[in-house]
Structures are given as structure tokens and as C-alpha cells.
Amino acid sequence: MYAFEFARPRTIAEAVKALKRDEALALGGGQTLIPTLKNRLASPSVLVSLTGIAEMKGVCRTDDGMVAVGGGTPHAVVAREARKLYPALAALAGGIGDPAVRSRGTIGGSLANNDPAACYPAAVLASGATIVTNRRKIPADKFFRGMFSTALAEGEIIIEVRFPVPRKASYQKFRQPASRFALTGVFVARFDDGVRVAVTGASEGGVYRWKEAEKALTAAFRPSAVEGLKVSPKGMIGDLHGTPEYRANLVRVLTARAVAAA
Amino acid sequence: MPKVTMTVNGMAVSGEVEGRTLLSDFLRDDLGLTGTHVGCDTSQCGACVVHLDGAPVKACSVFALDAEGAKVTTIEGMANPDGSLGVIQKAFQDHHGLQCGFCTPGMVMSAAALLKENRKPTEAEIRAYLDGNICRCTGYHNIVKAVLAASGQDVSRIAAE
Amino acid sequence: MPKDHGIGAPMTRREDVRFLMGRGTYTDDVNVQGQAHAVFLRSQVAHGRIGKIDTRAAAKMPGVLAIFTGEDFKDVGGNPAGWFIGSRDGTPMREPKRPVLAHGKVRHVGDAYAAVVAETYAQARDAAEAIVADIRELPAVVDMAEAVRNPKNRVHDELPDNVCFDWGWIEDNRAKVDAAIRAAPHVTTLHLVNNRLIPNAMEPRASIGEYNPGTGDYRLTTTSQNPHLTRLLVAAFVLGIPEHKLTVVAPDVGGGFGSKIYHYGEEALVLAAARRLGRPVKWTAERSESFLADAHGRDHVTKIELACEKDGTFIAIRTETLANVGAYLSNFSTVTPTFLHGTLMAGNYRVPNVYVNVKTVFTNTAPVDAYRGAGRPEATFSIERVIDVAARELGIDPIEIRRRNFITPDMFPYTTPVGLQYDTGNYGATMDRLVEIADIAGFEQRRAESARKGLLRGLGVNCYIEACGIAPSNLVGALGARVGLYDAATVRVNATGNLSIMTGAHSHGQGHETAFAQVVAERLGIPESSIEIVHGDTSKIPFGMGSYGSRSLAVCGSAIVRATDKIIAKAKKIAAHMMEAAPEDVEFRDGKFSVVGTDKSVDWGAVCLKAYVPHNFPHESLEPGLEETAFYDPANFTYPAGAYACEVEVDPGTGKVTIASFAAADDFGNIVNPLIVEGQVHGGLAQGIGQALTEGAVYDSSGQLLTASYMDYAMPRADDLPFFRVDHSCRTPCTHNPLGVKGCGEAGAIGSPPAVVNAVIDALHRGGYTHVRHIDMPLSPVRVWSAMQR
């Protein structure tokens, strides 16, 4: 790692201020950023740790029936505290990385990084969640801008994520054999007014909604509704662990399984 | 250099560290607690797992300064007060749950975290929980067996033959 | 009740206590007063010509003490290959120099061409980044077939092409084998890749060099499986240090699996740097470096032909293999694809005609060398895969075709057509045992249960044989080994009757401190607790060739037995003197010396004390003291063998393979500690299953390693594996070592990959995917799913 100054603000206001410094970088749980720093692929002058900000942690139900997750909430806490409030979200959080990673990694860090193989973006997009930052509220459909790219501006911090709770939901993740990230993951959320399907790990464009499946499932919420759909390998990621054709297949198979499991 | 203060295995400790000093470096280099091992640089192998305020973390993926004021437990803090092996440690020895010993501290710390959450885990739950601890020697067979035994479950039917 | 101590007892391991308390001492745990830190600058291109290396800016950076480049070592020796192999045409193998730091060219990604030593690790790393090297990239030689085809593009400019040697075994048999195959009623041909693996011992390599200017003594603390070999190589070949002025210490070592047998340039560098700076120099690899710069394993491309009668009787086996040695010859790299591979190509079978051809090829990739099993997994995989395909083609049950061809117990000692003499074995018995423990009879029912879950279940079976206990010096010497492969032990009895045993084996997970003590305790009739096993320090141990090739107990353990027997002989003399009897009348049993036919006896402790309080010894005929050394050179290899069965479930939607069960029936001869033996098998199985399902090192066409971290190199995890069923009740003791033991460290890794692949192919065939004849390892979900698509 290159040398940097370490800041550990206690409030959002202090964090926002610290992040205004030149070459400042926010640190969530660090489970992706720390390995990146070790590899000397980033060289912040000051690293602003968000782990000490109590007001950014926790899971609760809001007055309007949403589930709100603080941006600094570790996956393990979401897995525990959202179990009754939003079981599919809790299950997703409980399947990220491994227990030690889940103790540290946070929802805000995951969303801000927007790794194309991360799990949370699928839940956020399929749920139609709202990302609340220190400046504004961003709907999920406007937040993700392709691999490792989001609507967040420099110095903007994810304070909270608000999830509408679907009637039924399930996340099906097919793990990349080495990293255990999602080789492909599909989150299916059935709301009263329709079904949303979000796919992570598969597309070169990052997380996306599979609108064709949404339409078919809104008409008939059963696995067979998607089994006949064609998924084009065009634009799918091809690497050691999966060809574009393979990922296209997984999208269909996992969507059907998510419907069955929801 | 900034100063960091924490409690490690029940002892108050402090030291001057850089911003980039990892908790694993602080434990190994500053405190001489070399039982916490570093086996990778991508937060994957789990040899460095310690408990930070009761939760398992990879000490190579936490900055020392982020552990300010925290309670840390390492493998050196797992023995009984009289110095004998603790229940999980003893089960690892009884069931040959270690060979070269390098991943062992992280394994024991992860197993301890599991048993705190889940007093009688199933085989599948143990395997899933140890997902972030890589062992190259044992094939995990005797590790899983040891964790089952440490939780008081009968392992006599998991005989090797 | 099993025994509670001595040979055969499942004793828990004494070394566990320090490991479980975090009190082990691995090399990186050692910090020497005044140590500086080394960082290596490694090539980012696979192949390039080194122009000017500008170190001026780096040298001025804070904390920098010294910078080394290949120029600093151009006049010292190279790291040699330990085994000479001749080509079919009689020409010697090509041996390009392997320097401490790359000189002239860099030849693989990760090839170190400079090193910085600084006060701190961070300073050294900062300075390394400030070095400006003019490296002109050259086209990379990556694919072996292309490397052979196109000799213009060469890894080593001074060689005429990229072939190290073209080996035929046995060349004189070639025409006969060709004729047998031409005349055979059935020939099964298979093209196989034995995937390249990265050993990934959990402890990354580390080394500390020290030099004492007052005495001229060097000390190297390093992660080694055999410190004596490292001492010999560094002293005699690389740096030219007098061997007696260099101590090599390998303290607790966190796994090796072959990768820590070899001497590496980093070890020479820290010693040279310590000499230049007059202070200790430490280097610890990051895992990313381990991926790039540790010796890799396997990496064969093979065509195998099996000729049989219509009833499945084997007639001939012929193979052609390209074996990758990477950019440089690592110490065991030439023997692994030849004498550890070709000589096993008859397997457990009566097959009268066998011919093996291996071309080893230089490429711009990391050196490839022995990795757990080393050559034998490649042989086993080729034989056992082609047998399975032949059985399917001939409509014979895969277990039955093997049984029909087994070498039977009455045929031992059995000389194979590939130059080995198996001393003993009973392959039918291990197969019988396997059928039982794997519950082969219940397979159909389990398959039906899997089918109800929508999963395709398959059963794969195979046998293996290996040659281990490496090795008889006279045999290996005749085959080209440049060292002897005996081992040594010293047994030192203290005046108070307890013992220190100095062994040339090195334990890096195998439990020698426990098992070797059991051997001696049994021999002497004393408790294990009074025996200490000392290993891993050249200043304490007479000599040793270290631990690999499943040799520790068979060879080093035999040396301990021989030295212990000398102790008993000497102690009898002392006892005879004490009891005023003739030594030949003294009997030693259960820790007591007695005069036959009398009630006179003295116990072990009294004799030991007397040895060191030799009042009234007849000094002309009886020396004081009780310490003996023995060197043991085995008469033959040992031949562990077994039969393995794997059941898999394949998810047809995703191609994911799950190991539903795995059973292993092994014949290891006599067993000293069954707990440890089982653990060794478990670990071997995990590595073999890893090779079959998840692991594979992949370079792209430019020579970049795509699987350069745990993010892309898939290590087996706890949830990838089941509980294993292992059995070692079939025992045909080795006929030529005093313990009757064979070695168990590599068996699991040798025997398991074909069982897994056979099972997956079986599952697909039973599921209707009959067009799938073979899938190359690792059988990752994408590969299996892709193979299933027509």
C-alpha cells in the first residue's frame, strides 16, 4: 500500500467534510478496497473510514412499510436483522462472501463499488429500492451506470437504502468457483403490481433488469413462464469461468429457480 | 504517527501505527502475536481471522486504526485460563483437524464464531460457515468432524472407515 | 481396543499443541535484530529482452540499502536440475542456466530481475517501483505444441529450439509396441490434458539470510521441505559458499506439496544481500508472488492408446506426451515427467507392451516441477481414463475390465515392461474392499434418488499404483539422478534415558514428531514422551534428503530404525558389562536388559546412565556415550496401491458437479499412526478432487497468468467436499524396509482425479448425453454444461 492518512469520523457531517479533501477516498467495510490498496491500484491521500458512524448502521421498518438499511450496515447484521422484515434480502446478505467478510463488508460499500458480480445490486434493482445519500434520493433504476459505475458524485455517501418489500422474493446465486462472487445471480421480486427481475454477474453492462421475464412473470408467476424465453449471449461476460452462452443459460435457469423458491 | 489503543486477549495495548497499518501487521509486528497468519492478499484465505468485538474478521482486511477501542481476540487468547487447550482447540487435536498448522488459527477462530452463533451446527452449516477459510492439508474432513465434536455432537459414526 | 501407543496407535499429535495455541514458529514469524527487507521486481511480460535497468532514482529513496540486478550474479553459478535425462537420439538434455536474478532476458511473468533491500518492507516496495527497466517485449512462447512447431521463437536463445529433451521409455521396445498395437483387435485412443496446477501451500514462501562477518558463517532460515538439499545447492552450485559455513534452518513450514522442495533464487538473494550489507535480510512472498513464482505442477498434453482383445485383455499401451517445464529447469523438473511418470505406465495391470514418449518443452511460463504425486497422477489419469473409455466401447463393466487385467498376488515380485519391479501388492483385495465401503451395490438406488431431485448421478472407479519412498540410490543413479536418495538419522540417548532423534525428514504437516517417536518407542519399549524428534536444521542433523515422494517414513523412518538398532546393540554391550555377562547372552525386551537363562536384569534408564558415567568401562572395547548414526539407502521403491470410487451429481441446468461420495481403499503396508494416515489420504483426495473439478492455472496467449489469485484460481473449500470413506485394512507390507511401510502422502492426489472424471462421464452417459466421451479437467460448471450441449 502507498501511505495515506487515516480519518475515522463519527458523524456523517464529519465524513462529508473529510471527503472534501484532495484525493480523499471513502472506506466502507474495506473488503474490496483494502485488497485494491494492497495491490497499489489506488493511492488516496486520505482514507475516510465510515465504520465509526453509528447513525449509518442498522436495519428498521419505516413508517411507510419499507425496510431501511443504513449504508454502513455490515452484511452479517442485515442477514440477522432483516430476517423477518425482508427474508430474501436477509438471505442474500447472508450469502455474500464468507462470515468474516460479512462482519465488515457493508451495503453502502457494495453499492458504491457496483462490482458487476456483486449481490446487493440485484436486490436493490429488483426491489426498486431508493438509495439515500447525504445529498439526495436516487431510485435504483437511475443508480447503476454499468460496471463499477454509479450515479454517485465525488464525495457523496450512501446513508441508507430503502427497500419496498415484495410479496414474494428470492435471490438465486450461482457462485464463481474461485471468488465465490456471483457468476450470475438473479433476484426476483413479486409485488402486487408486477414482478421485477434483476440480474447480476452476467452482463458486461453490470446489473440489469430482465424486462422480458418480468412481463412473462407478471402474467403468470411460475417457473415455466421463463423456461421458454430466449436469452441472448450478446453482451454477456465471457471469461475463464463462463462463456457468454453459459451465462445466458444461467440467467434463464436461475430466474426459473428463483420463481420456484420465492 | 497516530496512536491506536485496543484490548487484545483481555490486555489493554496501544501503539503508534501508520494509516496503512493493517490489524494483522499490528498484531504480528507490534504485539508479537504471530499466531495470526497472513496467507493471501485478496481477503480470501482466512488464516488471519480474529474476533473484533465478538465478530469474526479477516485481520488482513481491517486497518489497525479502525479497531480503535475495540476488543480483539486472537488464537493466543483461546486457551483455557490454566493454559490448557480450549474445547475447540482440544477437539482439533483429538480429531486431527490440522496438519501444517498454518490455516489453523483462522479455522479455530471461525469455528469459535460459528459455535457462538449456532451451538449445534449441522455438517452442512459448518462447511458453509468455513467457506472463507482455506485449508490445503486436511481436505476439511477432520476439521468439520472436530467442530461437530466441539459442539458436543457424536462423531463416532463419521469414522474414517 | 486399538493400541494406545507405539506402532499402530492412533496417537494425537504432539505438534498440534503449539499450532493450536498460535505458538508455531514459521519463517515469517522470525524477526532477527537489525533485519532489512527485500522486495523483488518481477517481470510483467512473459518474454522480454532486458536493456538498461536504471536504479539511480530508486537508490536515493528513503531507507534503501542495496539494489541487485542480474548483473550482480552473472559470474556466480546457476540453480541446477537434479536429474539428467537423455533424448531418444542419445543427445543430452538442454540445461540453460537458471540465474539468481534474470539476466539478458526475462522469461515468464513474475521472473525476478531486480531486488531492493531497504530498512522497511514499504520502503523497499516504494523503491522497487522507482526502478526504470527497459524491457523490450518479445513474442511469448506459451502453447507447447506451437513451441515445438516453431523453433524460431525461443525461450532460450542459445538453444536450437524449445525442446529440453525427447525421451523414449523404453526406446528398445518401441517397434514391438507399435507392432502389437497395429495387430490388436481393439484400440482406444484418447487425447488428454493433465491440467497445470499451482501448489498453494497456505504459508507463502519466506527466507531470512544472515551473515556473521566475525566468523564468516551464513545462516538461511527458509520455507523448505529439505534444508540439506538447499544447503548443497546454494553452497556448491549457486553462491560458492563453503558448505560447512552455511546453516539452513527450515522451522515450522506451512505445507509444501512439492513446491518447497526446490531451491529458489530468493534464498540466494537474501544470503548475498546479508553478506553485502552485514545485516540480516528478510523476504516474505505475498500470495500474488506465490502464484507467479512458485513452481507449478502437472501440465501435460497426452495422446494415449490402449490396445486390447475383445474380452478386454490388455495388449499394449502407447503414449505421446508434451510436458511443460516452464521457463527454467527447476530442481526435479526433468525427473517428474519421465522416471516418475513413464515407469508407472503399466499401472496395476499385466500389459506386456508399453512405450512412453515424453517431450519436455520450455515455455514462457513459471517453472513446472513436482507437485503432490509428481508424474504418477499424470500416469494414473492417462491409464485409468483410457481404460474407462475402452470398457465402455467394449461393453465391459469398468470394475470387471480392471480385475481381468490385474497383476495377481502370486506374480510378485513383478517386473513391468517399463522398468520397475513391484515387490508386493494385492489389487483384487483393495478392489473388494472398495466395492464394500463404497456400497457399489446400492448405487442404482442412490441414482434413482438423485434423479428424483433432477440430478444426474454417476459412478466412477479407478485403481492406482505409485512408486514412492524415493529412492534407491543405485537405481536412481543409473537413471540419471545427480544425488543419492538415501537418508540419515542420529539417535542421541541422554544420561537420563530420554532421546533426541535427528532426522533428515522435514515435517511440514505430516506429523513426524509424533509418528517417528512411536516407531522408536515401540523399538525401545519406552514411552513416546521421552523421545524428541529434531528436524529442519542442518547444523543439528547429520544429513537428509528431506520430505517428498512419500519417503519420510519408508526411508528416513528406516534410517531411524537402523540407528535405534545400533543403540540397542551398544546398550546391550553396556548392560553385559554391568551384569558381567557376554553381550550375546543379553536380551532386550520391553525396556529391560536381561541375561538369558538368569534372573539378572538392568533397566533402560540404568544402562543409559552408565553410558555417561563409565566408571570401570574397559575403554579399549567399550566407548562411553550412547549415540548412533545410520544412513539408510532403500533397496527399491515402495509401491502403495489402491482402488477409489467417486459418486457425483451433475446439475443438468448449470453443469455443476457435486461430489456425492468418495471412497478410497489403499494398501500402504504397515501403518504406524492410522489417524495421521487417514489425514494424509483426506488431504490428497481434496487436492485430487481440486484438480478434477476446480483448479487449473491458465495463461493467455501473451503469457499473462489469468488465474493469479484466489479470485480466479479455485481452491477447494469445505463446502466443495464431503466426508470421505477411507480404508487401509488391505496390507501387503513392503518387503524391503524394516518397517514394512510404503508411504501414504501422495496416494490421495494420485488416485482421485480419474475417479471423479469417470464418474462425471458416467453420469452424463446415464443421463442420455452419450456424445460426451471426455472433458478436460477441471470439470468446471461451464465446461460440463458446454460439453452437454450438442
Image (tube, rainbow, N blue to C red):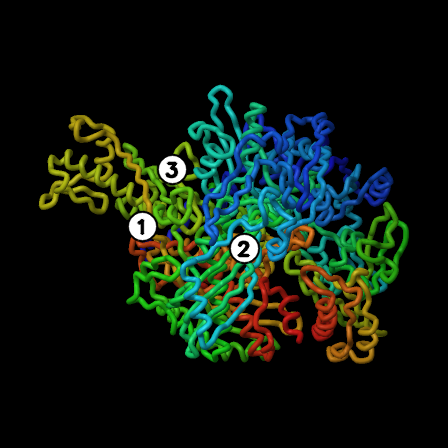
Do marks 2 and 3 both belong to one polypeptide chain? yes
Q: Please tell me which residue lies in front, A143 or A241.
A: A241
Number of marks present in the image shown: 3
Disc on res. C323: 2
Three-letter residue code for mark 3? Phe
For disc 1, the chain is C
The answer to the question of whether label 1 and label 3 lie on touching residues, with beta carbons closer than 8 A, is no
Task: Choose top left, top right, bottom left or bottom right for residue C34.
Answer: top right
Three-letter residue code for mark 1? Ala
Circle 1 sits on which residue?
A: C635
Do marks 1 and 3 both belong to one polypeptide chain? yes
For disc 2, the chain is C
Q: Please tell me which residue lies in front, B146 or C107.
A: C107
At mark 2, the secondary structure is strand
**Image vertical order of residue C487 relative to residue A199, above or below:** above
Quarter placement of the N terminus of chain C: bottom left
Q: Which of marks 2 and 3 is in front?
A: 2
Residue ID at (55%, 25%)? C275
Task: Choose top left, top right, bottom left or bottom right for residue A118.
Answer: bottom right
Question: Disc 1 or 3, which lies upstream in sequence?
Answer: 3
Task: Choose top left, top right, bottom left or bottom right for residue C533.
Answer: top left
Residue ID at (24%, 35%)? C608
Circle 3 sits on which residue?
A: C543
Residue situated furthest top in the rendering:
C214
